[in-house]
C-alpha cells in the first residue's frame, strides 16, 4: 500500500523452479532493516541460482527475497538507518509474527487422513489460506502477510540477520537439531542455539511452529512431522560486510540447497561442525544495571569462565570516576558470542551474550529472545 501520497514500496522476489516442485526453500534477509551482511550475501547467491537455473539444475524451488523490509530501509534518520523497530509503534520487526496454527486447524478439521504425504500437502494448503487471510490494515501488517504468503509452505525457511558485533551463529528449534547441524557445518558456524520454545514470535518460529501446534487445536489425534525447518542465521556483526565473508557464505548456502536436493550438483563432503549445538537457555546475557560507557576486556570469540570480567562500565556522571567503575561479569562458562557495538549503554542493555552449555535458571523457556 502507499504509505504516504506520492510514495510506493515494493518487494523484489526471485523465484526458481516449478512452483509445485519440492522441496521448497525460502531465503530472505535484513528483516530488521539495518543488517548489511545478508544484503551482500544474497547478491552473491542470486547469480549462482541464475546459473543453476539456466543449466536446468533447479530440482525443487527456491524463493529469494533480497531485502525483506522496505519499511525499515526507508526509516532513515539523520543519515542513519536505525532498523529493528517500526517507527509506527508496532514494535520489533522480528517479534509477534502471527501464529497461524489455530486458523489452519480450523480449515483442516476432519480432513486429515493419517497418510503423511497427503496430510503435509493439506496442512501447507491450509497455512497458505490462513496467511492469505491475515489482516492488512497497516503497512507493517501488509508486509507480514505478503512475506508469510511466500514462506509459509516452504520446507526450509532461512531468515538471514546479523548481530551487533558477533560470531556467525544460528537459532532453530530443537526438533530440527540435525538440519541445523547440517546448515551450521556448511557455514562453519561456531555457535548454534537450539530452543524448545523461544517465545517472542520470531519469523522463523512463525513458519516452523504450526507443524507441532496445529494438532493441539484439532479434536482428532494426529501426528504431523516438523515439516518446516525455520532457522535464523546471524551473519556475524553489522560491520562484518566483506567480499570474502559474503563469497564464502553464499557458497555455503548454495551447498546446503544442493545437499537438500533442491539444486543439482555435488556439494562435496560435509565439513565438520565446529562445536555441538547448545541450548538457547544456556546463553548468558550480561546486562547493565545503569547507564555508562563500556570498556570491553574480552573479544568476540574468546572462551570465558564464570565470574570473569567481560567489560567495565564507567559512569560519566560520577564525581569520583574510579570509585564508580563497575565490572560486568560472566554468568556462565562459554564462548563470547556477541558484544554491544554502540559502547554507550543505558540501564538494562544486554552488552554481551555468552553461549554456554548448561541451562541457566534465570533464562525462562518461552522468553528467551531479547526485545
Ligand atoms: Zn535481525
Image: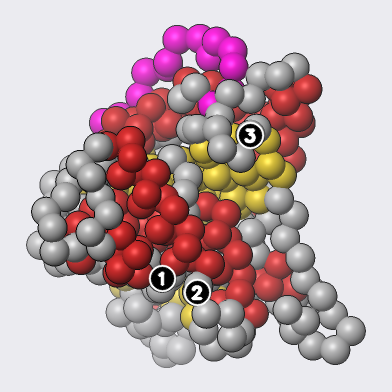
Q: Residue at x 25, y 37 (%)?
A: 115
Q: Which residues are magenta?
A: 262-276
**Proximity of marks 2 and 1: CB atoms separated by less than 8 Å:** yes
| Whether residue 17 is situated above or below residue 206 in the rendered picture | above
| Distance Cα–Cα, label 2 vs label 1 | 8 Å
- Residue in the image at 89% along x and 84% along y: 6
Alpha carbon of mark 1 to alpha carbon of mark 3: how far?
28 Å
In this picture, residue 336 sits left or right of residue 138: left
Tell me the residue that label 2 is attached to: 134
Q: Main secondary structure of the magenta part?
A: loop
Question: Which comes before the other along the chain, label 3 or label 2?
Answer: 3
Few, some or many residues within 10 Å of mark 1 (<14, 14–19, 20+): some
Q: Residue at x 70, y 29 (%)?
A: 49
Front residue of 123/137: it is: 123
Q: CA distance from mark 3 to mark 2?
A: 26 Å
Residue 165 pos. (x, y %): 51, 53
Query: What residue is pinned by disc 3?
Result: 18
Amino acid at each position: 500500500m502507499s504509505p504516504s501520497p506520492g510514495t510506493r514500496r515494493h518487494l523484489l522476489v526471485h523465484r526458481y523452479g516449478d512452483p509445485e516442485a519440492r522441496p521448497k526453500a525460502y531465503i530472505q534477509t535484513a528483516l530488521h532493516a539495518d543488517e548489511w551482511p545478508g544484503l551482500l550475501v544474497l547478491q552473491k547467491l542470486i547469480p549462482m541460482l541464475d546459473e543453476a537455473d539456466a543449466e536446468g539444475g533447479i530440482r525443487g524451488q527456491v524463493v529469494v527475497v533480497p531485502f525483506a523490509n522496505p519499511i525499515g530501509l526507508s526509516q532513515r534518520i539523520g543519515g542513519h538507518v536505525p532498523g529493528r523497530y517500526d517507527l509506527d509503534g508496532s514494535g520489533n520487526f522480528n517479534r509477534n509474527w502471527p501464529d497461524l496454527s489455530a486458523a489452519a486447524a480450523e480449515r483442516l478439521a476432519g480432513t486429515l487422513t493419517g497418510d503423511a504425504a497427503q496430510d503435509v500437502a493439506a496442512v501447507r494448503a491450509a497455512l497458505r489460506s490462513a496467511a492469505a487471510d491475515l489482516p492488512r490494515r497497516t503497512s507493517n501488517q501488509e508486509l507480514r502477510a505478503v512475506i508469510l504468503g511466500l514462506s509459509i509452505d516452504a520446507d526450509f525457511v532461512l531468515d538471514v540477520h546479523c548481530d551487533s558485533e558477533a560470531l556467525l551463529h544460528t537459532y532453530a528449534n530443537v526438533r530440527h537439531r540435525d538440519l541445523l547441524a547440517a546448515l551450521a557445518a556448511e557455514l562453519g558456524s561456531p555457535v548454534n542455539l537450539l530452543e524448545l520454545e523461544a517465545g517472542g514470535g520470531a519469523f522463523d518460529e512463525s513458519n516452523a511452529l504450526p507443524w507441532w501446534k496445529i494438532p493441539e487445536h484439532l479434536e482428532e489425534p494426529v501426528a504431523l512431522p516438523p515439516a518446516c525447518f525455520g532457522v535464523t542465521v546471524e551473519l556475524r556483526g553489522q560491520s562484518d560486510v566483506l567480499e570474502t565473508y559474503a563469497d564464502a557464505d553464499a557458497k555455503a548456502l548454495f551447498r546446503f540447497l544442493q545437499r537438500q536436493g533442491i539444486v543439482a550438483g555435488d556439494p562435496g563432503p560435509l565439513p565438520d561442525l565446529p562445536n555441538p549445538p547448545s541450548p538457547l537457555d544456556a546463553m548468558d546475557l550480561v546486562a547493565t544495571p545503569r547507564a555508562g560507557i563500556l570498556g570491553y576486556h574480552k573479544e568476540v570469540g574468546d572462551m570465558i569462565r564464570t565470574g570473569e570480567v567481560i567489560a567495565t562500565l564507567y559512569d560519566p556522571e560520577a564525581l569520583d570516576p574510579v570509585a564508580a567503575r563497575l565490572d560486568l561479569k560472566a554468568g556462565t562458562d562459554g564462548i563470547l558470542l556477541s558484544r554491544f557495538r554502540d559502547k554507550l549503554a543505558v540501564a538494562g542493555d544486554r552488552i554481551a551474550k555468552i553461549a554456554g552449555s548448561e541451562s541457566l535458571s534465570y533464562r525462562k523457556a518461552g522468553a528467551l529472545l531479547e526485545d
